[in-house]
Image: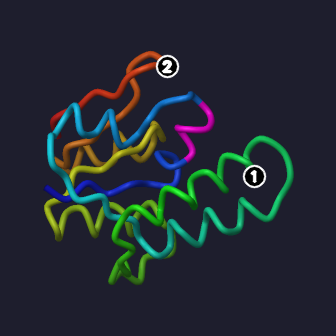
Amino acid sequence: MKVLLDTNALLMPSQFGIDLYDELMGLFGDFEPVTLEEVAGELRGLARGRGRDAAAARVGLAMVRRSTVVPSGSSADRVDDRVIEYARREGCVVVTNDRELRNALLREGIDVVSMRGQKTLELIRG
């Protein structure tokens, strides 16, 4: 199963102390982590800064190396729209903690993995 990791998902390990891959293994067993090139680009931009968000982005970039990085194949302006288009086209589950993106994905009938509390991940059917 392909599991698409959003920028926000890749920040969660540092921000909340979650082991993202262990949590996803608990939900799905075997899965294929996928990251869009545009998401990796957002993380690189954040990582150049200072502070907690930059540190979280550097951790996220290390996690990107454990996933398959692919082009979105979309010309949409916003990365969130590219995530939605890719997930719809490829039949992926999307991991994000971004409320706006999560709601948009669910409206499109796309399954989402999001944080429950601040300790675990849960699958929400779209």
Seen at 32% across and 33% down, the residue is 23
Going by the numbered disc 2, the residue's amino acid type is: Gln
Q: Residue furthest top?
A: 117
Residue 122 drawn above or below residue 95: above
Residue 10 drawn above or below residue 25: below
- Find numbered disc 2 in the image and state the secondary structure of the residue it sits on: loop
Which residues fall within the magenta stretch?
Answer: 11-15
Q: Which residue is mark 2?
A: 118
The residue nearer to you, when weighing 87 against 5, is 5
Q: Does the magenta portion include 73?
A: no
- The mark found on residue 42 in the picture is none
Going by the numbered disc 1, the residue's amino acid type is: Ala
Seen at 16% across and 40% down, the residue is 28
Task: Tell me if 1 is positioned left or right of 64 in this view.
Answer: left
The mark that comes first in sequence, 1 or 2, is 1
For the C terminus, the image quarter is top left
Specify few, some or many for label 1: CA neighbours under 10 Å numbering under 14, 14-19, or 20 or more: some
Q: Which residue is mark 1?
A: 54
Seen at 28% across and 68% down, the residue is 85
